């Protein structure tokens, strides 16, 4: 009897110990941990929402009334804006690379030549001509010491806003971001970082948003970034090279010229210059101020051989109330000095944008936004008349993987 009881106790103890081991077995690793173990970082999110031109609205059935906000190029519609995926392996020493793909309606506008959508900002009957998918970045890199060289297609150095809306503080993009700076470049870029707070960039690229070159001369990019602390970041970047001066801007929706000087009759290669600077200040952990300034010029923009110039200034005031609630207020003044870049007349276009963000979880955010643009002249049709103001409202959600 004692022997049988001993066997029973042994069996019970063994069963309990096996159960305890099963309960304490480690959970299967998640995908991000598997990638991290391989030295690969990932960024992925889905972004969708609803936009409308409902106040101060020109008479437009379903199209954006201006080109000032063309990412939100439809009014009164639900839209899948982005399905964003980026995978990168960028060691501090040796060979690495990055690939970034974007799907959704925004992909139609960030494409590079020769794949970019050439349809004007859609009106009631306008349609996009692409398939809502873009290979936005793809490059190899080699890092050694203070030097990193990249070859392929990558984001521009210019601007305070980026393609990745997860890190942008507003739903809509600024006028300058969409009209005065490039989105991507294809070429070779060298970064020299003599310290953790200072870096210099030199590159040769096809031009602005050109996966294949449209002109023979390359564009030179120069950059300087100074980040002395978490509370202060400053960068200065410039681009210079030939571009095809355009003869398609400067007209209203009835194809009436609204600038004082006639444009060239056909595109010709001519020097395009951009100087851009971004300053970020964080007086407190909750409050940040961002200043972005741009100067641009296009040679041979007009029939008399003269050049066109434009200037832009953006101010962002961002405040994080708590872990869930935040706001971002953006003010912009875009001075289209010669009426060339935007096509709504000579002078300043002003914009004010307020965005409220609510994060129900660490992986998601809901955003709501109102915006008003004021043009230098009453050139946008509204009812039976013309207006110089366009209002915009939107809500959207972002879910991060």
Image (spheres, helix red, strand yellow):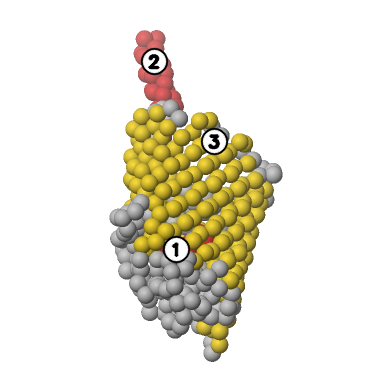
Residue 57, given in percent of the width and then of the height, sits at 55, 78
Q: Which residue is mark 3?
A: 198
Determine whether 190 is above or below 16 in the image.
below
Q: Residue 364 versus residue 12: which sits nearer the camera?
A: 364
Crowding at label 2, few (<14), some or many (≥20) Cα neighbours within 10 Å? few
State which mark lies toward you, 1 or 3.
Answer: 1
Q: Which residue is mark 1?
A: 299
Mark 2 and mark 1 in contact? Answer it, CB < 8 Å.
Answer: no
Crowding at label 1, few (<14), some or many (≥20) Cα neighbours within 10 Å? many
Residue 88, given in percent of the width and then of the height, sits at 38, 40
Judging from the image, what secondary structure is the residue with disc 1 in? loop
Q: Residue at x 41, y 39 (%)?
A: 190
Examine the rendering and report whether any part of residue 132 can be seen.
Answer: no
Q: Residue 278 versus residue 217: which sits nearer the camera?
A: 217
Determine whether 393 is above or below 241 in the image.
below
Residue 318, given in percent of the width and then of the height, sits at 64, 53
Residue 365 sits in which quadrant?
bottom right
Q: Residue at x 42, y 77 (%)?
A: 123
Tell me the CA gap for discs 2 and 1: 91 Å
Q: Which residue is mark 2?
A: 10
Q: Is residue 18 left or right of residue 193?
A: left
């Amino acid at each position: 009897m004692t022997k049988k009881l001993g066997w029973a106790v042994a069996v019970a103890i063994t069963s309990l110990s096996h159960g305890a081991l099963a309960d304490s077995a480690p959970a299967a690793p998640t995908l991000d941990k598997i990638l991290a173990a391989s030295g690969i970082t990932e960024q992925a999110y889905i972004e969708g929402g609803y936009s409308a031109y409902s106040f101060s609205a020109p008479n437009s059935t379903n199209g954006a009334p201006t080109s000032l906000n063309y990412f939100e190029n439809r009014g009164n519609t639900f839209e899948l804006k982005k399905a964003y995926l980026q995978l990168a392996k960028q060691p501090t020493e040796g060979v690495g690379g990055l690939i970034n793909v974007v799907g959704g309606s925004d992909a139609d506008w960030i494409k590079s030549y020769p794949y970019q959508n050439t349809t004007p900002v859609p009106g009631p009957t306008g349609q996009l001509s692409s398939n809502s998918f873009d290979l936005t970045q793809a490059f190899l890199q080699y890092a050694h010491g203070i030097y990193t060289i990249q070859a392929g297609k990558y984001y521009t150095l210019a601007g305070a806003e980026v393609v990745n809306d997860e890190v942008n503080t507003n739903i809509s993009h600024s006028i300058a971001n969409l009209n005065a700076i490039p989105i991507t470049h294809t070429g070779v870029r060298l970064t020299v970082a003599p310290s953790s707070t200072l870096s210099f960039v030199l590159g040769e690229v096809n031009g602005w948003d050109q996966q294949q070159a449209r002109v023979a001369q390359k564009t030179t990019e120069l950059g300087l970034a100074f980040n002395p602390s978490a509370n202060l970041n400053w960068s200065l970047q410039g681009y210079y090279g030939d571009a095809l001066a355009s003869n398609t801007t400067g007209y209203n929706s009835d194809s009436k010229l609204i600038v004082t000087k006639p444009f060239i009759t056909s595109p010709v290669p001519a020097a395009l210059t951009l100087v851009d600077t971004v300053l970020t200040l964080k007086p407190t952990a909750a409050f940040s101020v961002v200043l972005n300034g741009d100067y641009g010029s296009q040679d041979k923009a007009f029939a008399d051989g003269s050049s066109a110039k434009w200037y832009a200034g953006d101010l962002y005031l961002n405040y994080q109330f708590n872990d869930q609630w935040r706001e971002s207020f953006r003010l912009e003044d875009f001075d289209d000095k010669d009426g060339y870049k935007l096509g709504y007349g000579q002078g300043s276009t002003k914009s004010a944008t307020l965005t409220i963000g609510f994060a129900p979880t660490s992986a998601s955010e809901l955003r709501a936004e109102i915006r008003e643009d004021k043009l230098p002249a009453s050139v946008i049709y509204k009812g039976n008349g013309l207006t110089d103001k366009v209002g915009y409202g939107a809500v959207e959600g972002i879910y991060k993987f």
